[in-house]
Image: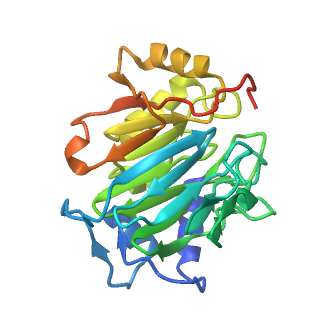
């Protein structure tokens, strides 16, 4: 995506009548680019609700439960393997492929936040769902899709900042890199078929340098092994014996590490 086009999309979002305005974002760049003139607060003190655990839980493919300390629940990219009846306060959808937009599987009357319109254009999101702030930025799935066709979602809860890359098909632009450089946990597609290959994906990781990278968008566990072998000489790889990862600022590595969660429902489908 051209630099001017990306900035134009971000600037246009400031003019849209949105449901509610986020009161905190992970990165000052988001304040400048998305909320000029708004008196927003940065929450980076390391303090947050003590009512419970912050965690992410992987449902397979690109679907996660993002769970705040006060039990706010956001489901990302619900797919065909998400257990019907799971309750959430909100659902985010990075693209309209059927493996990412099974919103009917999520109960509890959640707010549906679609990052892409049916015309494959960016749908800007800037909102707070209880104590989780959610914003998105436009990206592309790949040259063969055209237009935008993908949305990168960013979630802030307490002092933690998470990013879900959806189906990214390109290296980050300077503007995207600037927005994402404060991310603590990045959920990254590794299938190397409908998304970036391992070499370019490693370049994206280097652009952001998040403490934790969680591989996603694969249905065959062997794919995680291949990715681990490729990046193992560059980044430490941790294999988590669960599909859930409890998060806190104190557990974040000082430099990038790959956290491979246990696949909850492995299949033999490549998508």
Q: How is the image coloured?
A: rainbow
In this rendering, does residue 144 appear at all? Answer: yes
Residue nearest the viewer, comparing 17 with 11: 17
Quarter of the view holding residue 61: top right
182 shown above or below 158: above
Residue lying at the far front of the rendered structure? 85
Indicate left or right for 129 with 248 as reference: right
Q: Residue at x 61, y 31 (%)?
A: 196
Q: Residue at x 60, y 25 (%)?
A: 197
Q: Position of residue 25 (x, y in %)?
A: 36, 67
Indicate left or right for 98 with 54 as reference: right
Q: Residue at x 54, y 15 (%)?
A: 226
172 shown above or below 190: below
Q: Position of residue 11 (x, y in %)?
A: 53, 73
Total numbered circles: 0
In this rendering, does residue 177 appear at all? Answer: no
Q: Residue at x 64, y 43 (%)?
A: 167
Q: Quadrant of the C terminus?
A: top right
Residue nearest the viewer, comparing 4 with 120: 120
Q: Position of residue 97 (x, y in %)?
A: 77, 48
236 shown above or below 162: above
Q: Position of residue 58 (x, y in %)?
A: 53, 42
182 shown above or below 219: below
Indicate left or right for 212 with 1 as reference: left
């Amino acid at each position: 995506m051209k630099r001017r086009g990306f900035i134009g999309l971000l600037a246009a979002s400031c003019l849209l009548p949105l449901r509610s305005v986020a009161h905190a974002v992970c990165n000052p760049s988001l304040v400048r680019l998305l909320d000029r003139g708004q008196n927003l607060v940065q929450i980076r003190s390391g303090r947050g609700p003590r009512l419970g655990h912050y965690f992410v839980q992987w449902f397979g493919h690109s679907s996660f439960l993002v769970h705040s300390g006060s039990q706010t629940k956001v489901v990302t990219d619900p797919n065909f393997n998400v257990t019907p009846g799971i309750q959430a306060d909100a659902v985010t959808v990075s693209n309209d492929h059927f493996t990412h937009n099974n919103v009917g599987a999520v109960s509890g009357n959640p707010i549906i936040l679609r990052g892409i319109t049916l015309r494959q254009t960016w749908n800007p999101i800037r909102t707070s769902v209880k104590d989780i702030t959610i914003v998105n930025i436009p990206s592309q799935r790949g040259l063969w899709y055209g237009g935008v066709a993908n949305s990168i979602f960013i979630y802030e809860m307490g002092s933690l900042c998470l990013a879900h890359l959806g189906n990214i098909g390109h290296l980050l632009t300077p503007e995207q890199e600037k927005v994402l450089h404060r991310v603590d946990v990045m959920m990254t597609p590794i299938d190397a078929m409908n998304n970036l290959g391992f070499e370019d994906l490693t370049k994206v990781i280097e652009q952001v340098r998040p403490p934790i990278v969680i591989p996603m968008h694969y249905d065959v566990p062997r794919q995680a092994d291949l990715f681990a072998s490729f990046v193992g000489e560059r980044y430490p790889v941790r294999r988590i014996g669960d599909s859930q990862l409890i998060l806190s600022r104190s557990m974040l590595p000082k430099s990038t590490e790959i956290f491979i969660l246990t696949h909850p429902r492995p299949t033999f489908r490549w998508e």
